[in-house]
Image (cartoon, rainbow, N blue to C red):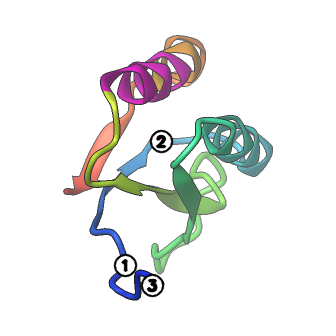
Amino acid sequence: MMQTAQEKQLGYQIQCHGLPLAVYREVAAHLRQVEGVQTGLIPQQSQRFDYSDSQVGGLWIQYPEGFDLVGRERVDRILAYYGERYGAWELLSH
């Protein structure tokens, strides 16, 4: 018998001020290599143009409810790697 109920997804949204679009894409690609993780870019919502702002509003990250500790640690290490180089990640929503 096939399971029709989808597994509950947990997730959050983060941003790093001034992070270039190409780096956001690199972070998303890197995170997708962790089994069970889904991620994507959030469009920029700002109404005013600021050259120093990113073209992206942030990054959403989702994972299954039963996501294991090893996977969470890998996600944290990936985010820490980019955070150390480009600036701190800020939580947008949980």
Q: Amino acid at mark 3?
A: Met
Secondary structure under badge 1?
loop
- Read off the residue under disc 1: 6
- Read off the residue under disc 2: 17
Q: Amino acid at mark 2?
A: His
- 77 inside magenta stretch: yes
Whether 11 is drawn above or below 84: the answer is: below
- Read off the residue under disc 3: 1
Say whether residue 70 is left or right of residue 23.
Answer: left
Whether 14 is drawn above or below 47: the answer is: above
Q: Residue at x 33, y 84 (%)?
A: 5
Depth check: 77 or 83 in front? 77
Depth check: 92 or 3 in front? 3
Depth check: 91 or 63 in front? 63
Q: Residue at x 31, y 24 (%)?
A: 69
**Which residues, given as a range, are shown in magenta?**
69-78
Residue 61 % position (x, y): 44, 53
What is the residue that sits farthest to the right in this orientation? Answer: 22
Residue 7 % position (x, y): 33, 69
Q: What's the distance in space between the residues labelled 3 and 1, CA to CA?
A: 14 Å
